[in-house]
Amino acid sequence: MQKNERGNILLESGTNEIEIMQFTINNNLYGINVAKVREIMMSVPVKHIPNIHPAVEGIFKPRDIVLTVIDLPFYLTGKHSEPDHKDLFIITNFNKIYIAFRVHTVVGISRISWTGIHKPDKTIANGDAGVATGIAQCEDQLVTVLDFEKIVADIAPETSIQMKEVENMGERNEREYAVLIAEDSVLLANVLEKALQKAGYTNLKMFSNGQELWDYVKSMANDPELLRKNVSIVITDIEMPSMDGHRLTKLIKTDPALSDIPVVIFSSLITEEMWIKGKKLGADEQLSKPEIGHLIDVMDALLENKNKA
């Protein structure tokens, strides 16, 4: 199997699989997508910064970059505890930001299918406020996969989609293109929907995962006129239960009846490695959240070119 320079296994593109790193906080088992992890290191003392969110411990500089440290035990429980020298820092990179999260132990890595990750029910998810993005079966353990993007957005709202980017575009005409969006985060889906509507894209259809969107598109594959009317462009996240965005892209782009549909991957995971994967699968564009203004510009260009064809 191919490995990158950090030693992480690079999954074959479009297989609908994920590697989950399992870690513990107060003996509870949680998970994070390995694609977000850049390093694991022993915890060290951090420099406190005044007037910051209570879940932010402070900053430290391991090498050539200053990192913010989030006290994940406090964020999840609301209770402060003395840092232990045995604690670990999980260094992450998503949305083009490096952040360190304090955890108690790291257990290991499991490779599973996205079909094995289930959306938590409302008693756990707590609507927009929930931080459990999925429940995964890893070997004989149930693992709560956390929504790290939402955790960071709660602490620093400026890291999420900014409606001001759309407002700065000024008045825009309404566009009748049929835009299909696959996004499993309820919070992000709502914000994305409002932003695109404000940008003139009012004909939106939202799906909570790639499987739902694929079933919808595939049902029209044999009716070109129906397809043309109901599918102009697809916007997809990567991380989603049931079917991820890479698998969705591969299915669309390898189906002769559907391959002309523009597909834009809009994800927090657009690293160099992920960009290469998406390119191989045929994605027309790949953008990092939360660049909503860039997404709208790309949509405008792709749809204008498609209309000319």
Image: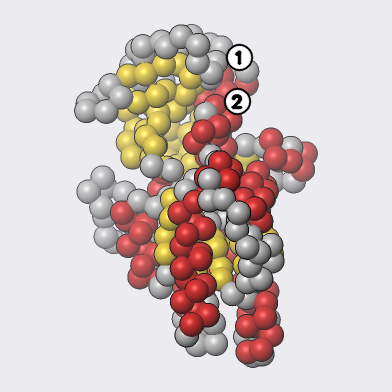
Q: Quadrant of residue 199?
A: bottom right
Query: At x 46% / y 62%, what residue is drawn?
Result: 298
Q: Residue at x 60, y 58 (%)?
A: 172
Q: Of all residues shown, which one is farthest toward the front?
A: 171
Q: For residue 98, which quarter of the picture?
A: top left
Query: To which quarter of the image does residue 275 belong?
Result: bottom left
View extreme (right): residue = 123
Considering depth in this image, is 229 or 11 the residue closer to the camera?
Answer: 229
For the residues labelled 1 and 2, say whether their Cβ atoms are less than 8 Å apart: no
Residue drawn at (62%, 50%), measured in percent from left and top? 195
Local secondary structure at mark 2: helix
Disc 1 crowd, CA 10 A, few/some/many (<14, 14-19, 20+): few
Q: Which mark is residue 228?
A: none
The front one of 44 and 235 is 235
- Identify which amino acid the numbered label 2 is placed on: Leu
User: Mark 2 packing: few (<14 Cα in 10 Å), some, or many (20+)?
Assistant: few
Drawn side of residue 94 relative to residue 38, left or right: right
Q: Is residue 221 above or below residue 15?
A: below
Question: In what quadrant of the picture does the N terminus appear?
Answer: bottom left
- Residue 236 x, y percent position in the rendering: 54, 61
Which residue is at 64% across, 83% downward? 227
Q: Report helix, strand or loop for mark 1.
A: loop
Task: Give above or below for 73 relative to 212.
Answer: above
The residue that mark 2 highlights is 76
Kind of residue indicated by mark 1: Lys
Check disc 1 and report the residue beneath it. 79
Q: Is residue 92 at least partly visible in the picture?
A: yes
The Cα–Cα distance between marks 1 and 2, rounded to whole angstroms, is 8 Å
Image coordinates of residue 178 in percent, x first then y, are 65, 71
In this rendering, is residue 57 above or below 294? above
Residue 149, horizontal then vertical, whole percent: 52, 39
Q: Position of residue 32 (x, y in %)?
A: 48, 41
